[in-house]
Amino acid sequence: MEILGLQLMGEPAEQGQLLLLSSHNPYLVLLAGLVAFAACLATLHLVERAGNADRATSKTVWRWIAVGCLASGIWAMHFICILAFTHPAAPRYSLGTAIGALLMTLIAAIAVVQALHSTTYWRSRHQLLKLVLCIGAAAAMLSIQLTSMPTLTDPLADSSGSTHWQLALAVAVVVLLLIGSSASAALVDKKLQHKEHDLRRVNALLSQLDQARASLQQVAHYDPLTNLINRRGFNQLFAEKLSDCAARNSKLAVMFLDIDHFKRINDSLGHDAGDELLKTIAARIKHSTRSHNDVVARFGGDEFCILINLNHRDEAQSMAQRIMLKLKEPIELSGRQMVMTTSIGISVFPDDGASSAELLKHADLALYQSKGSGRNNLNFFSSNLKTRASLELQLEEELRSALNEDKELFLQYQPIFDLKNGRVTKLEALVRWQHPEHGLLGPERFISIAEANGLIAELDHWVLRKACHDLAALSLKGWQHLGVAVNCSARNLVRVELADEIESALRSSGIAAHRLELEVTENALMCNLSSTSQLLRQIRTLGVSLSIDDFGTGYSSLAYLKRLPLNTLKIDRSFIQDIPTSSQDMEIVQAIIVMAHTLHLQVVTEGVETTQQFEFLNQYGCDFIQGYLISRPVSFEVLQETLEGLNKSPVPVPDHATFIPVSQ
């Protein structure tokens, strides 16, 4: 009979049919099982490799290799199992049947591999589970093969086992080598693919790092609002341009720009509107430069800086003027037409410095000069500015020392004459500095330094305490009716601690609150009207009087006069000095007096120096006068003597003097 390609033949016995005893060689069966297990395990790895391959061609190649491994393993197992089958008959092989069995095995292997490849279940299992599955599959295939061997009849001559062993080992070795080579190739290819993936991942990370570096470079060197170079990027380009100009022996201009009164935009329209305005200003400045060689940077806030290469110094002035004109063009902002101006300071390499730090400092000094001379202006650096800056730095240090040690500073007092009562009823406290080197300095010399360097609050507090102390000393000498007026700077008027400091000074000196008057300027009131109004009401609640100093030189608006808790209005000396020769000034003063009285405010006129001015003010109802006609400012040591002299000989009012009303 024919079984799986092995032809078993025998002659019938005399009695009819004889039973042929057969058995299996256990070692060859074990060898067949090993081959089957290796084939299954390699097939799973190859199918997994096909599933993880990147290219379609690679997937197809690994699937066919898996088919070959499984088919060769099944066939080798089948062949070895036949060789393991021992019987008395001599086996004979049928080539056609063997080829048919091989083709069926190949078809089965294709089906199995395709089924495994179509699902990710087996590719995602644990390795131990794969081993168990492969052992089970090999055992199942081996059991089917062994149980398919039928019982043979008709005994034949015993066949030799040594030949079967050699053939089985040869087939097993060849097939195992084939399977092992395929599995090894899959493992090597997997490692190569992992390395390729790692390389791609590294390249992707490097690309991300390059993008991140570029982003950081953008953030580090460019202003995010205006997209201009920031201070850090500017300094880097500045150093490069300086080196280039030094090598070519050419000139380089540094321009510092500051937008005039920009803070008002943020305070009135909000910071979003301020940002939009800065974008527009930056674009206009950039548009006003000559080429990409000119560097425009935003240093922060409303400060900009420009670097331009020069052939002549006049080129810098021309560009600065062009920028100033460009910025004066109306800007649409929050439904309003805004017109902005700028102050510019310019320094030139190599005339004004050799290093970037020196040139920037000198351009900043020139900018300070432009702002100090009325803004909307440009100035070049000069050596005088450096000398002045050095002197102001020295004065700042010495002023700080004078405040800390309570020396050199003192107060002078100028009497304020009450025209209705005919006597001095108030004093204005005026700070002076007896400098050991520069002599007597008035407030116009050091107040701005104190404001610029954060000393003004301490200075105002010193004046307040000193004035209250001196007034208390005068009260002990019989001058209980006198009041004192002290000035408050714009920088100090926004401090919420001011009311507490005033209350503390009054309490420590023991004088009544109504005897103290706080003088503020119009511009100081308008810097931040809402918060200023609240602070002034808090001070007014203490009982302290409030006065507007230098009225007429600022905004002069009736609207804020109605909103603020004021007591007194002080007309600036600039309206008095040309009376009676200037009819226009006479009309202005008369109108101010009428307006103030309408608002129930008392009027003080400062700068009165002639009897004609005195007569005019007395005729038109001015309440108080102050000036050299009454008395110059005097020190506290001679103040009592001055007051006594004024009480004995008040300023005479001529009976014959009659002014014709200016309206006529």
Image: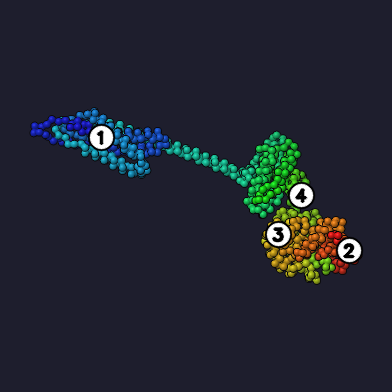
Tell me, yes or no, if residue 517 can be seen here: no
As helix, strand or loop, the secondary structure at mark 1 comes to: helix
Q: Quadrant of the N terminus?
A: top left
**Image colouring:** rainbow
Marks 2 and 1, Cα distance to the nearest angstrom?
145 Å
Q: Amino acid at mark 3?
A: Leu
Which mark is first along the chain, 4 or 3?
Answer: 4
| x and y, in percent, of residue 131 in the image | 32, 42
58 on left or right of 23 = right
Q: Quadrant of the C terminus?
A: bottom right
Residue at label 1?
Answer: 78
Marks 4 and 1, Cα distance to the nearest angstrom?
109 Å
10 Å crowding of disc 4: few (<14), some (14-19), many (20+)? few
| x and y, in percent, of residue 224 in the image | 61, 46
The extreme left residue here reads 15
Badge nearest the viewer, 2 or 3:
2
Residue at label 3?
Answer: 493
296 on left or right of 152 = right
Q: Residue at x 24, y 37 (%)?
A: 145
Residue at label 2?
Answer: 658
Q: Amino acid at mark 2?
A: Thr
Residue at label 4?
Answer: 373
Marks 2 and 4, Cα distance to the nearest angstrom?
42 Å
Badge nearest the viewer, 4 or 1:
4
Q: Amino acid at mark 1?
A: His
Which mark is first along the chain, 3 or 1?
Answer: 1
